Image (cartoon, coloured by chain):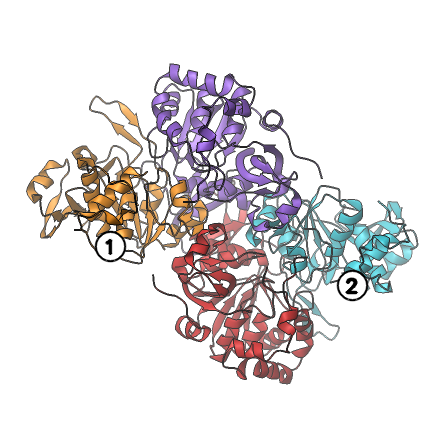
Chain colours: A purple, B orange, C red, D cyan
């Protein structure tokens, strides 16, 4: 087998091209911050980012100048509020935003997964989103003549995700809350995955029900402990709630968000360097607790 | 059901919270919504006030309801406030970790009895807005968007909105129709909206003040809001939550 | 919570009605033989059975007079050959057979799972099956104008399955090869499940990624060790290969298949009685081996 | 690659099988198909001879190919013959237990390089029959049906059929078109058929004898079958499998 193990630097350089459509894995959980840091560091640009609900990792990619377009059903800081960075980028014309709904984005990725041109659904027939969303057309059901909306397939060029573990061949094991992650990966042409641990294939064989991605599409496996920080990873570490809570105020003015990019991304050669710059016992404090 | 106990012995060592007006206000809105839920129903739960509704339902009124979150978490025990639909605190109590497709499919199949939502605005047609607000000066304020709200509104068998008292949220026409009250097939759509003083139903397609807490006055509530609503001939007077229930709400909101 | 635990006798009596469309779970694995035995014993009739690939459990239900209609992509004894019983029932007119393909049946169940009226696919546009399958109509893609076949949703009245374990509330945990089982269950109105073990909900919480069925649709949980015999159950027991190998010749003539029903079903009050009638050490010999 | 070793030391204690003509015949057909597979390709594998193709590919020619079965088993090591696509012997070697929907979706997305199929009949158009046969007396003999064969034929980027020598299986028109050679989009369809003597390609849309084992005669093979086929101008002579390869085929077929 080809050894797919490489660094985030190598993977982002080799497999993410400017103008690509990129699916961002993780949903409130297992968010691939390490890979996103590297995308910013390598100054990727003109990307079309696609997702159901967009967490603050999108702030990082938009502030970093990576994205020219965003398609999603929601964007902001979950439970906290709006995204200052995205609102500002849209207002200034730097970022084209197509607002949709989480389920429509999910259906479009799912059509991409199934390899069909569209999936019919009753959603987005009415309301003010109906006129502005992408990739929807009205059709008639050939059986009942009732009207539905055809939600067209979305097949991103590449998906980035973080998971618990993988073997070197890309048999990626992920558990906990998955949201839209699996569908988005299956819909994508290729998958870049960072993991906490790289394990032997024999260990994969002990729990093949945890393997969630088709190995033949996984092009890069990156060993990156805490690669989902500041989000959480089931059975590995808790979310840095303070980081999320302060993020919205930390990004209220451009000056502050520039500082954020500088100290968290540009001051470092890699994600480990960033992790090392965090306050001494922070990562220890985030140790997973069962309850 | 015990909403009157003054004791906090049952709080399992969690610190007794300071009961603020904000906690009481949220508890009242949530309790009004929770009263609309029947035991064993399947609930699709949004973030914010809907989580408190779910918590109070599960703890006091409908212990066997099935809580489902858009992240794919199912059979959840909503014991502390989650910040997102995938937060670890609810993931750890979920008996099934499914996917987002799984749970939205349930909605679309018609298996979700009640969708619990909040919104920035609700109007007299039952439309919900979570996309953008237009200020008096004509400026547009962007909000995070639909998320699953549009989908839940169209696909749940019935939707109950739960909102703070803020009169700016109750309008004749929302600034933007994120979630149209246009239910799929023979579903009920937005059945009502709970707020800290009262519950309005949309049984006739327009808001009717249907239930009110005993410490509030129907006319003044109805007039305080910025929308054309009526008072039901069969207005129901409801005892407001107190004691244990308020305390549990306080613990829930604090330990998030 | 309502305790959903009951016997197969109670579950079949209460939840399977004559003329129902029944999805049969299990795919070469975890085949719900115990429940099927009970359906035969209770002389259920006029059922429409739906499935992708139909294993010999269908022989049992057809020979037992339970089915008047069968929709599937394949029927027979896997790796061995044709189904004598089904061929004969179709030839005699007792059984209406709609032959399709495994993927079309899968798509129809999946449309049922999604709650959409149909899913478009390029399959069954050509060939001799195209003219005779059920639930397919030609449509145009509203985006490309290309032609596809709309595979209409199938929503069975009830699904029967066997799984490793469940709690008393119907949080069913199933692993190993699943085939079409999950989709078929999600598409169905209700699910009857037999399991090897009924466990505490606390055990479910330790591995919620193994829970595969929405508990609110599981109406009956039946404790039935070896409930998938003679098929296998991952991590529990191997398949009785001899049984399968001999089945095809054992059912070549009606006399023999009547005898088969008599000795395996009608001579017993329940499945445990049948299991007890098997040669002494047989079930021990089927103990699961890791390799 | 070593097809010449006479030793069975490597058989890990498995009993050395008696090499019958049937084993040799199957090994020859499977080896002819396996030669068409490139390393690292994704293979969607049917039951029967296709499994032996997968086994010989993995063991000798294309050790890194990805084996996928319709049950949802992926990344399989096909070491012993499975009776069904969900058999425990392959489930135990699979690195991923997905679902039937997952793997057929891969096919439909165009990610399966080669579909490996057998059939009761193949005709000069590349159509396959696994539904029913009409006997000379006009009687219909029912077969188990398509299973995934129709779907694989339409959706795999390329299909290789693998068949026994039986001339009744090679016909000008199949009795029933289960799996039409009508590939979706720009896929290749049925590229060829391997049998114990030879390999016919469908490069021109009709069968052309493209490869033949060195111990066989092209004219006699071509004439022995019941269909209109031609012999390629660039006919390739292939050494038949022997030694280790035949032995491994024997072990594979025996230990099922």
Task: Identify whether A128 is placed above or below C208.
Answer: above
Instruction: Please provide percent x and percent y for residue A46.
Output: 51, 23
Instruction: Please provide percent x and percent y for residue B219.
Output: 6, 42
Q: Which mark is residue C282?
A: none
Q: Label 1 is found on which chain of the structure?
A: B
Q: Label 2 is found on which chain of the structure?
A: D
Q: D150 and C40: which one is in front?
A: C40
Q: Looking at this rendering, what residue extends furthest in the top direction? A: A255
**Residue picked out by circle 1:** B61
Q: Helix or strand or loop: what does disc 1 sit on?
A: helix
Task: Identify whether C39 is placed above or below B232.
Answer: below
Q: Is residue C30 visible?
A: yes
Q: Is residue A142 visible?
A: no
Q: B102 and A287: which one is in front?
A: A287
Q: Is residue D224 left or right of residue A262?
A: right
- Choose mark 2 or mark 1, whichever is in front: 1
Mark 1 surroundings: few (<14), some (14-19) or many (≥20) residues within 10 A: many
Q: Is residue D180 left or right of residue D21?
A: left
Q: Quadrant of the C terminus of chain A?
A: top left
Q: Is residue C14 left or right of residue A213?
A: left
Q: Helix or strand or loop: what does disc 2 sit on?
A: helix
Whole-Å distance between the Cαs marked 2 and 1? 63 Å
Q: D218 and C267: which one is in front?
A: C267
**Residue shown at 43% from the left, 54% from the top:** C117
Task: Identify whether C51 is placed above or below B210.
Answer: below
**Residue picked out by circle 2:** D254
Q: Is residue C201 left or right of residue C274?
A: left
Q: Quadrant of residue B123?
A: top left
Instruction: Please provide percent x and percent y for residue B210.
Output: 14, 50
Mark 2 surroundings: few (<14), some (14-19) or many (≥20) residues within 10 A: some
Q: Quadrant of residue C57?
A: bottom right
């Amino acid at each position: 087998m080809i050894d797919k193990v490489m660094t985030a630097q190598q993977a982002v350089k080799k497999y993410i091209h400017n103008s690509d459509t990129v699916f961002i894995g993780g949903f409130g959980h297992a968010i691939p911050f390490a890979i996103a840091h590297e995308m910013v560091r390598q100054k990727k640009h003109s990307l079309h980012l696609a997702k159901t609900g967009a967490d603050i990792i999108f702030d990082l990619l938009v502030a970093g100048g990576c994205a020219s377009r965003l398609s999603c059903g929601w964007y902001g800081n979950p439970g906290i509020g709006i995204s200052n960075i995205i609102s500002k980028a849209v207002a200034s014309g730097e970022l084209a935003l197509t607002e949709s709904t989480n389920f429509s984005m999910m259906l479009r990725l799912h059509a991409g997964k199934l390899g069909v041109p569209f999936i019919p659904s009753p959603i987005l027939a009415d309301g003010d989103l109906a006129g502005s969303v992408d990739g929807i057309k009205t059709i008639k059901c050939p059986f009942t003549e009732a009207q539905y909306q055809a939600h067209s397939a979305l097949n991103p060029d590449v998906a980035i995700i973080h998971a618990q573990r993988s073997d070197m061949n890309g048999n990626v094991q992920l558990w906990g809350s998955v949201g839209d992650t699996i569908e988005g990966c299956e819909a994508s042409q290729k998958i870049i995955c960072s993991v906490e641990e790289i394990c032997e294939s024999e260990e994969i064989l002990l729990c093949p029900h945890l393997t969630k991605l088709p190995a033949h599409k996984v092009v890069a496996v990156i060993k990156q402990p805490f690669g989902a920080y500041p989000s959480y990873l089931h059975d590995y570490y808790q979310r840095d709630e303070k980081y999320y809570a302060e993020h919205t105020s930390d990004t209220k003015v451009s000056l502050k968000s520039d500082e954020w990019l500088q100290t968290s991304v540009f001051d470092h050669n890699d994600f480990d360097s960033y992790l090392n710059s965090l306050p001494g016992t922070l990562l220890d404090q985030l140790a997973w607790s069962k309850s | 059901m015990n909403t009157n106990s003054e004791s906090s012995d049952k709080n399992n060592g969690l610190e007794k919270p300071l009961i603020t007006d904000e906690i009481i206000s949220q508890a009242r809105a949530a309790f009004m919504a929770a009263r609309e839920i029947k035991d064993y129903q399947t609930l699709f739960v949004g973030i914010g006030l809907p989580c408190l509704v779910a918590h109070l339902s599960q703890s006091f009124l409908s212990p066997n309801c099935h809580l489902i979150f858009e992240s794919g978490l199912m059979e959840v025990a909503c014991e502390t406030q989650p910040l997102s639909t995938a937060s670890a605190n609810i993931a750890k109590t979920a008996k099934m970790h499914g996917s987002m497709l799984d749970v939205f499919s349930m909605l679309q199949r018609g298996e979700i009895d009640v969708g619990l939502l909040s919104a920035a605005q609700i109007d007299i047609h039952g439309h919900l807005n979570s996309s953008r607000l237009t200020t008096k000066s004509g400026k547009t304020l962007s909000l995070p968007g639909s998320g699953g709200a549009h989908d839940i509104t169209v696909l749940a068998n019935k939707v109950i909105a739960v909102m703070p008292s803020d009169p700016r949220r109750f309008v004749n026409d929302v600034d933007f129709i994120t979630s149209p009250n246009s239910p799929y097939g023979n579903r009920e759509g937005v059945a009502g909206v709970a707020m800290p003083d009262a519950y309005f139903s949309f049984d006739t397609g327009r808001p009717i003040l249907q239930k009110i807490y005993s410490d509030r006055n129907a006319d003044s509530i109805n007039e305080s809001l910025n929308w054309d609503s009526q008072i039901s001939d069969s207005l129901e007077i409801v005892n407001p939550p107190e004691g244990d229930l308020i305390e549990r709400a306080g613990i829930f909101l604090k330990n998030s």
